[in-house]
Amino acid sequence: MKIRVTFLSSLLILIMMSFAFAPSNLSPKYYEGKWEVLIKDTPQGSAIIPMRFETVDEVTTGYFTEEGVAEEKKMSSVKITDDALYAAFNISGYDVTLNLKKVDDETAKGDLMGMFDAIGTKMK
């Protein structure tokens, strides 16, 4: 009886581990290029943040342009997991996080700081 329980437990653990290490279905290439990300209903109203993502040696880097500033700023971090993009950056003196998930070939939706809806549109 103990052997059967041990065998079933081991089998269950192996199955769970196979799902935990399953590769993501979405390639980082989806997020590459220029995006306009609309942040809805902030205290200052809705805002569009131009963003750009690039992947080199399987590491994705993000850049954004703050309103009234001509130069791009580099994001603190960008990570793509479970078909979603997670980014952290400082804008207007605030440390913020953004997550986006693919909707279709041109659109991604998510939120900024878990409080404000975000809609990303891929630029051509």
Image: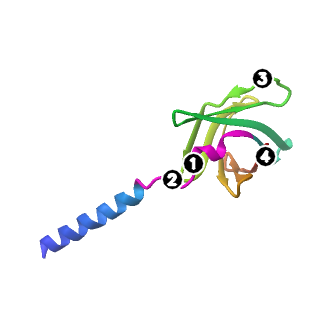
Q: Are there few (<14), some (14-19), or many (20+) residues within 10 Å of tag 3? A: few
> Which of the two labelled residues, at mark 4 and mark 1, occupies the earlier sequence position?
1
Residue type at mark 3? Glu
| Percent coordinates x, y for residue 39 in the rendering | 78, 46
| Percent coordinates x, y for residue 34 in the rendering | 74, 38
Asked if the residue at tag 1 contacts the one at tag 2, i.e. Cβ–Cβ closer than 8 Å, the answer is yes
Task: Give the extent of the magenta segment.
Answer: 21-34
Q: Which of the numbered marks, if any, corresponds to residue 71?
A: 3
For marks 4 and 2, give the one nearer the viewer.
2
- Cα–Cα gap, marks 4 and 2: 26 Å
Asked if the residue at tag 1 contacts the one at tag 4, i.e. Cβ–Cβ closer than 8 Å, the answer is no
| Percent coordinates x, y for residue 29 in the rendering | 61, 44
| Percent coordinates x, y for residue 122 in the rendering | 75, 46
Residue type at mark 2? Ser
For the point 74% across and 26% down, which residue is it? 72
Tell which of 46 and 121 is nearer to you.
121
- Give the residue pinned by disc 1: 27
- The vertical placement of 40 against 67, above or below, is below
- The vertical placement of 40 against 11, above or below, is above
Q: Is residue 23 rendered magenta in the image?
A: yes
Residue type at mark 1? Ser
Tell which of 58 and 12 is nearer to you.
58
Quadrant containing the C terminus is top right
Q: Secondary structure at mark 4?
A: strand
Q: Are there few (<14), some (14-19), or many (20+) residues within 10 Å of tag 2? A: few
> Which of the two labelled residues, at mark 4 and mark 3, occupies the earlier sequence position?
4
* In-image side of 66 versus 29 (left or right): right
- Give the residue pinned by disc 2: 24
Quadrant containing the N terminus is bottom left
